[in-house]
Image (cartoon, rainbow, N blue to C red):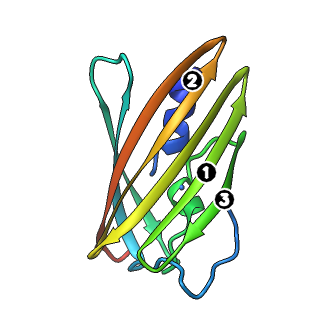
Amino acid sequence: MTSRNLAIAACATILLTGPTGALAMKIKPGNWEFRSTNSMHGANAAQEQVGEQCINDPVLKPDTLMKEMNNGCRLTDSQDGTDAMSWKVSCSNEGGEMTGNGNVRREGDGIVGGMEMTMSFKGQTMNMNVGWTGKYLGPCS
């Protein structure tokens, strides 16, 4: 798996199993659309991905947003509040490593966030930024 694919897999759906406190970020359960745009230093154009996800839990957690994350990844240092949260991620897979910082904040019925990542693969280091938005579409089908 290339570093770019590793990063895209980590952020595909824009997703720790830490404790959920009373100040956890709450969202409306249902079907959500997530859009992510990633840009890599030196790349010609940003790539956009769109996907839908049924979220049944009214408490948003980083592992929900990073659902498509690769098995070689770990989420740590989760900080959450009623309107925002942040976390760190580290991945190691097939000779490559990736570290990053993610965040998301609630804006009305939607969410906005992103990640800054550094990837090392076969002696090359690349930086990537991912921005995402999520919007509530309605009840899950």
To which residue does mark 1 refer?
88
Looking at the image, which residue is at 41% across and 75% down?
A: 83
**Which amino acid does the dot numbered 2 rest on?**
Ser
State which tag comes first along the sequence, 2 or 3: 2
* SS state under label 2: helix
To which residue does mark 2 refer?
3
The image shows residue 3, relative to residue 54, as above or below, that is: above
* SS state under label 3: strand
Image quadrant holding the N terminus, namely top right
Looking at the image, which residue is at 72% across and 39% down?
A: 72
State which tag comes first along the sequence, 1 or 2: 2
Mark 2 in CB contact with mark 3 (< 8 angstroms): no
Q: Quadrant of residue 122?
A: top right
Towards the viewer: 118 or 30: 118
**Which amino acid does the dot numbered 3 rest on?**
Asp
Camera sees residue 141: no
The image shows residue 55, relative to residue 39, as above or below, that is: below
Looking at the image, which residue is at 36% across and 65% down?
A: 32
Residue 88 x, y percent position in the rendering: 61, 51
Seen from this angle, which residue lies furthest top?
123
Mark 1 in CB contact with mark 3 (< 8 angstroms): yes
Residue 23 x, y percent position in the rendering: 54, 84
To which residue does mark 3 refer?
77
Q: Residues within 10 Å of mark 2 (few under 14, many from 20)?
A: many
Image quadrant holding the C terminus, namely bottom left
Q: CA distance from mark 1 to mark 2?
A: 18 Å
Q: Nearer the viewer, mark 1 or mark 2?
A: 1
Q: Quadrant of residue 30?
A: bottom left
Mark 1 in CB contact with mark 2 (< 8 angstroms): no
Q: Left or right? Give the position of 31 relative to 10.
A: left
